[in-house]
Structures are given as structure tokens and as C-alpha cells.
Amino acid sequence: MIRVGVVADQEFEGIGIRTTLEEDTQLRVVDPGRPVDVGPLLRAARLDVLILSFREEDEAVAALKDVGRRTCPPAVVVLAHDVTPSSVQRLLLHGANGVLRHISASAHLVWVVRATAGGALALCPDLAVPVVDAYLKPARRRQRRTSAQRLIARLSPREREVLLHVVEGRSDAQIAIKLSLSPYTVKDHLRSIRGKLGRDSRLGIARLAWQAGFEGELTTDGLEPIGA
């Protein structure tokens, strides 16, 4: 049996939450959801999950801080009225184990309570996508950088020099002057670069160089070339 407490700033909301939870026989609501402070409820009952429903985000954060000061605090699910990716992040950072949009909470409340009682972090689907994307973005950026560096590791030293000048926006003629090469040799190098990098345009090879971390020079950080 999962013991659930409800703290809502509006009595009718608390009653609605309780009604939804009581449809599951494995959940026991130990408070009717009437307006009450977190402290008295936690002192009066041992809870597995506490549900907070506040119209103001700051009130929810204050309640989360209160819960966090307790010994063996319950998991906390916040029903938020105005939800943005930044507000979800703020609630999670202050200890929320689950966050739901108030408007659609009834469709997800039971499974979220069960999940958080078991130690999981739970978000309704439309909130989970931006949060997960933000979490994965640095890893995806590193992955793209590493992949680009491995491709560039296939280039010869001279081809890397040519690529640097392409990234800096120079024409074939300008590159030829800079490197003391004939324009035809520059074209041959560019043809080879496009082939090795799997790109069919100057913009394509320049974009790959930027992904590899171009900042005045191209390095491969000791990576082995793809296909080596």
C-alpha cells in the first residue's frame, strides 16, 4: 500500500486529486486535500508520496525546501499550473520527484505516484521531451564533435591547411597564393577533401570543420581516423 498525502492551496483541487487517487486500490490517501501546511501533515503521517498543488511556483519551491529538511522525506510530485522548461528544471533542482501539468494531471497521476514511490523520476510526456532534450544536448554536441574530428583525421596535413582557408572564406585563387600552390592543385585538394569527408560542397566541409571545434586551427585530439 502506497501512502499518499495531498497539499493543495484550493480545497476543491485537493478533493479532486484524492478522488483520482482513490480509484487505485493500492493507493491510500491519508489527507483529504484540504488547505494545510506541509509541516503538520508530515508530522502527523508517514508518507511514501506527497502531492503538492499550488498556483504559485514559489509556494511549491518553499514546500519542497521544507520537505527536503525532513528526515526520510517522501517523494514529492508537483502539480504545476504554469509550466515552462525552466520551471520544471527549478522544481527538479529543489527536490521534486515528479512534475505534472495541473490541467492534465488526472490522466497521469496514478502512474506517476507509483513510479515516484518506487524511486523513479517521473514527468508527463509533454514535459519529459524538452527536459530530456536539454539533458542530452551536451552529449549530442560532443558526439557530433568527436565524429567530425575523426573524419578530419583522415585528411593529410596539406589538406587540413586547405580546409582551414576554406573555413576562413578564401577562394581557390586566394588559397593558392597563401599556400604557394597552383589553383589546379587547390582544386585537386578540395576534391580529395570532399571525398574523404563525405561532403559535396564548400559549405558542407566548412560546417564539418566548425563541428570539429574550429577556432583558428584544426586538431583531432589524437583520434584515429574512421576506417583506419
Image: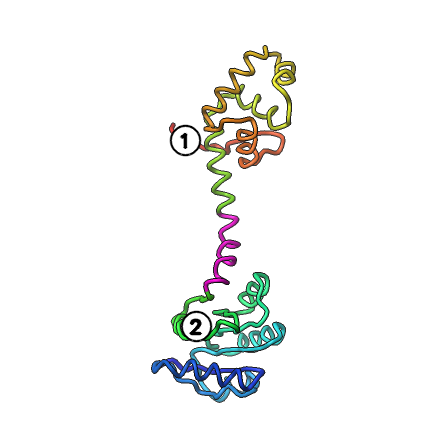
SS at mark 1 in the image: loop
Q: Which residue is mark 1?
A: 226
Q: Nearer the viewer, residue 192 or 44?
A: 192
x 49%, y 82%: residue: 6
Q: Amino acid at mark 2?
A: Ala
Q: Which residue is mark 2?
A: 107
x 45%, y 63%: residue: 125
Where does the magenta region start and end? 125-139
Which part of the image, by quadrant, shows the N terminus? bottom left
SS at mark 2 in the image: helix
What is the x, y in percent for residue 60? 58, 75
The answer to which quarter of the image holds residue 176 is top right
Above or below, 124 against 147 in this view is below
Count of picture labels: 2
Whether 97 is among the magenta residues is no
What is the x, y in percent for residue 205? 53, 29
